[in-house]
Amino acid sequence: MNEFDVGRAFPATPAYVALMQLWIATRHVLVLQRALLAKPGPNVVVHEQFLHTFLAITSTLKKAADAFRVADSLGRFSVVPADLSAELSLARRECDESNSSSLHEQVLAQLRNTAGAHFGETLIQRGLSALSSRSF
């Protein structure tokens, strides 16, 4: 029987924590996007759901941008196919928290406190550490 060694595949290092945050956040955005596109009720309900879902998406994208920046700074995207280099450059530019005209600073950082979705580094670090000696 083949076993999956969690600690070997996903060591509890800052780079893997950042990649896990990025994965969690982007999956969350996909689910929220589906909810945003659903039309479950009267216009008043649809409007309220749109607002809350939009804020949740924005906040989650802020966390994804933060995680992307950390993973990128730790070299996780150092080997990218040439045909994706333009997209990687765009992601770096728009996730740059030191650039006042970036999407991160213009939109995501501004709405984060309103939307409030957090996937903390410490929590993910603890989870990965706890699973590091497990095999499935």
Image: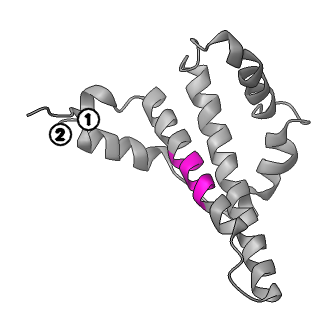
Q: Nearer the viewer, residue 45 or 19?
A: 45
Disc on res. 80: none
Q: CB atoms at circles 1 and 2 under 8 Å apart?
A: yes
Residue at point 62% right, 13% down? 81
Say above or below: 104 vs 79.
Answer: below
Rendered image: mark on residue 6 = 1
Mark 1 → mark 2, Cα distance in angstroms: 6 Å
Q: Quadrant of the N terminus?
A: top left
Q: Residue at x 58, y 59 (%)?
A: 31
Q: Residue furthest left?
A: 1
The residue indicated by pointer 2 is 134
Q: Residue at x 21, y 34 (%)?
A: 4
Residue 49, image quadrant: bottom right
**Main secondary structure of the magenta stretch:** helix
Position in image of residue 135 (x %, y %): 16, 38
From the viewer's side, name the closer residue of 84 and 7: 84
Span colored in magenta: 24-31
